[in-house]
Amino acid sequence: MIDELRKIGLSDLEARCYLVLHEDPKISGYEVAKKVSVSRTNVYAALRSLTEKGICRVIESEPVLYDAVPIEQLVRLLKSEFEQTTRVLQEQLSAVPKTAPSFYNWQGDKAIETVIRRLVANADKSIVVDIWSEDVHWVEEPLLEAEKRGVAVTLISIGECATSLKNVLIHKRSEEWSAVRARKFSLLCDAHSALLGSFGKGLKPTVLETDHPSLIELLQNTFYHDLIMEQIERDFGKELGEKYGKDYEAIIHPYKEYL
């Protein structure tokens, strides 16, 4: 029986003390020590441990008496604790472990077309694309398919473009944009996965696929900024031009030498 009690976490001495109390309840620690033939100091330590584990009960008297928790109650307690522990383990360890954010590099027309279609096809709720009008053909067809299945698609076009997409924001280009060599673009799906890349004459098309939360948040904030500025310029365009100059030159100029 000692071995069985040790299997539930009792030490050898704790198991011997429990059996003594089970056979002869409501006795003092001194009497327990005599029956197990161990020093009172060690027996009292074992009795304190049994009490803390809820296996032994104390009767406040003079002297203090000890009583074993009935084995039926102890077994039910152990079963309940075991079931709770196994339930927690199953819940925690069955969950898919979180993986570190990743970055994947794609190069060449075919690879980029494929990754655009894959991310767009897997979007369930929303897609936001920020792209130059010259490059809308890269994304227009898969975006139209996404719209048909109910995904909220927003296209932000840098420069005027002709498209059948429903929700399009047009960003006018300043004269300086004509000198830009790399035409950047981004695609954000369900605020979870994203593509960032660039197109341009003489450049090999390259995009970066990522689910890194910092870049996802950056693209979200850029989108919110675009929405806000679109509405503000629509409502107060004349006043903004008079106060800050064309293309907000009065605000931007002091920083141009640094950026």
Image (cartoon, rainbow, N blue to C red):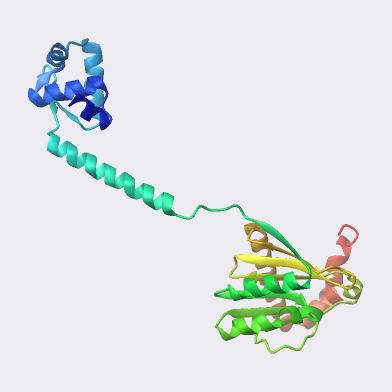
The quadrant of the picture occupied by the C terminus is: bottom right
Q: Of 159 and 124, which appears nearest the observer? A: 124
> Based on the displayed image, in which of its 4 quarters is residue 16 positioned?
top left
Examine the rendered structure and indicate whether residue 83 appears above or below residue 10.
below
Q: How far from the left and from the top, in percent, is residue 87? A: 33, 50
What is the count of numbered marks? 0
> Based on the displayed image, in which of its 4 quarters is residue 233 positioned?
bottom right
Q: Of 110 and 92, which appears nearest the observer? A: 110
From the viewer's perspective, tell me whether residue 251 is left or right of residue 112: right
Q: Of 158 and 253, which appears nearest the observer? A: 158
The quadrant of the picture occupied by the N terminus is: top left
Q: How far from the left and from the top, in percent, is residue 125? A: 55, 75
Name the residue at 73% across, 69% down.
111
Q: How far from the left and from the top, in percent, is residue 110? A: 75, 73
Examine the rendered structure and indicate whether residue 161 appears above or below residue 199.
below
Residue 93 visible in the snapshot:
yes
Examine the rendered structure and indicate whether residue 161 appears above or below residue 24.
below
Name the residue at 48% across, 55% down.
96
Name the residue at 67% across, 86% down.
165
Residue 25 visible in the snapshot:
no
